[in-house]
Amino acid sequence: MSRRRNRPGPLLRGGAVLGLVLLYALVLRPARPLLTHGLAVPAFHAAASDRPDAVDVVVRRAGLSVELYRAEGDSEWAFTSWTAPPGLIFLLPGLFLIALRPREAYWAVLLACHVGLGLLQIALVAAGISGSDVALEVYRFSQTYGTEVVGLGVPALLYVVAMQRGRREGGDPEGSDRGEDQPASPPPSPSEGKDSR
């Protein structure tokens, strides 16, 4: 009975899911263009200050992405682009983590990983604009694989952590979140339930 009382109910899960959707829609989504215009574009322009005519920085998709074009040569194709984190690849796994453990802030860990990767990618693109081909290749690798690892691998890792934590606490690993004051009942011994005469 006490175990049932400590399970997160549908109201808690639904409220947490709604809270994350509202956080994304009202805070994170509007903050993405601010990150683009306030940090990425100035960093890219500062990196190109040695050769101002070598790179054109173009903001696209209402400030969510930046495309970089070489001024010389074929300027119809961007040689690289950067997209502001966190996008839907954060929101959907974040909703999964909230459904898994609504009382834990695993979604915040995922958000921090996405923002950290985005900041690292800004630094790599800026170094690539400055002339480091290695930094640009590392950026392209992180754009292709790093974003997927953070978007899919981190939630899977957090899922494993949540399951291990649930087992260690002796509760239902799928979200019981039993408190410390309620010990797990020991399993019945083989002699229990039999008549001892």
Image (cartoon, rainbow, N blue to C red):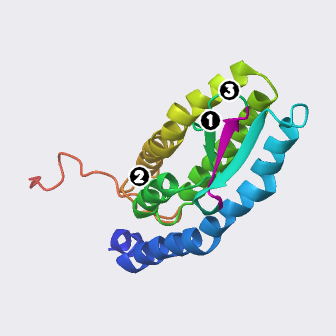
Q: Which residue is mark 3?
A: 136
Q: Is residue 70 left or right of residue 103?
A: right
Determine the residue positioned at 11% across, 52% down: 196
Looking at the image, is mark 3 or mark 2 earlier in the sequence? 3
Q: Is residue 161 above or below residue 71?
A: below
Q: Residue furthest right?
A: 50
- Tag 3 and tag 1, C-beta contact below 8 Å: yes
Q: Amino acid at mark 2?
A: Gly
Is residue 162 highlighted in magenta?
A: no
The part of the chain drawn in magenta is 63-71
* Discs 3/2, front: 3
Rounded to the nearest angstrom, the CA distance separating label 2 from label 1 is 50 Å
Q: Which residue is mark 2?
A: 170
- Residue 124 location in percent, x, y? 73, 32
Q: Amino acid at mark 3?
A: Leu
Pick the quarter of the image with the N terminus: bottom left
Q: Any mark on residue 80, and which? A: 1
Q: Is residue 83 above or below residue 142?
A: below
What kind of element bears circle 3?
helix
Looking at the image, is mark 3 or mark 1 earlier in the sequence? 1
